Image: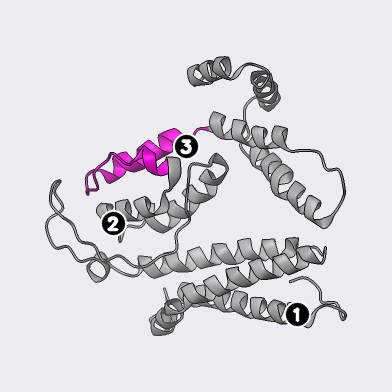
Amino acid sequence: MPKRSDDQDPDIESMKDEISELAEDIHRTLDIGKSSQENTDELPIFEARVFQLNSAFEKFVSLIAEIRKELRRDKMPYVEFMKLKAKVQTEYYETLAFSIKRNSPSRNTTLCSNLSAGHLVHLKLPSLELPIFDGDLSKWTPFKDTYVSLIHTNVDLMEVQKFHYLKSCLKGSAAQVISAIEISEANYTQTWEALVKKYDRNRIRAMNHLTHLFNFKPMTKLTCETLENFSAIVLENCNAFRKMQLPDSVGFVLYTFALRLLDSKTRKKIENRTP
């Protein structure tokens, strides 16, 4: 947490205290979930804490947004709160993963008919707050990592359950990719592979990172807000591009820059022909 200052607004100090308490509560729930795998006596405690997990996380996110707004208004740095949010969000999803893995399909699913195509399937699924993917390539990797961890590799979920979860996570152009595929046990793998084929392409993702960099407007004034914006766009995309470890990253940057000098029609043709 950021260091306190004696002359800071009491309301901000109060929000800091509450944010810290909620973060610690979510972290503690994750610890209990991990230890309950060996010590079954802690399972009831874990279940009770998970019951309140969503409300605690929602309140935490709300407070983070509120304190960020206050600090931006006062031209004070808030990057530490963004780091804390990312850390707590990761722990929140890890906790959900522990929760759904220890629940068998028979406890979480009600089938009112068989799962063959053309038959109605009624599912009662555990309520989970999953990340939303709308087709923005910059969001694909974190979405995929979280979804795979919580749902795709979860052996306690049936394929048709995973399909329902996947549908609930997609919006916009991403939802259109699978809109024509019927929800069924047999179609889940095909559906997930269709998404991966469209979005999990290194070249497209790398070009997307570079596009964000090329489109970034130079700072005209150094403020906390412009520095935060610089960090969020420039540094994050630079780091993401570097982590991709392309075989010829310099050549790829030059190639992408050259494409931007062409008219949109020609550029589209070249991009579609490039694997």
Residue sitting nearer the eye, 214 or 162: 214
Quarter assignment of residue 63: bottom right
User: SS for tag 3?
Assistant: helix
| Residue that mark 2 sits on | 161
User: SS for tag 2?
Assistant: helix
Can residue 39 be seen here? The reply is no
Residue 56 position in % (x across, y down): 53, 76
State which region is magenta: 174-201
- Mark 2 is surrounded, within 10 Å at the Cα level, by few (under 14), some (14 to 19) or many (20 or more) other residues, namely many
Query: Which residue is the extreme one toward the front?
Result: 73
Q: Which label belongs to residue 13?
A: 1
Residue 88 position in % (x across, y down): 59, 67
Mark 1 and mark 2: Cα distance apart in space = 43 Å
In the picture, measured across the screen, residue 25 lies left or right of residue 218, that is left
Give the residue type at disc 2. Gln
Q: Which label belongs to residue 156?
A: none
Q: How many marks?
A: 3
**Which coloring applies here?**
one colour
Q: Earlier in the sequence, mark 1 or mark 2?
A: 1
| In this view, 211 is above or below 49 | above
Give the residue type at disc 3. Tyr
In the picture, measured across the screen, residue 138 lies left or right of residue 121, that is right
Who's the residue at 38% across and 40% down the image? 176
Residue sitting nearer the eye, 133 or 110: 133
Q: Which of marks 3 and 1 is nearer the N terminus?
A: 1
- The answer to whether residue 193 is magenta is yes
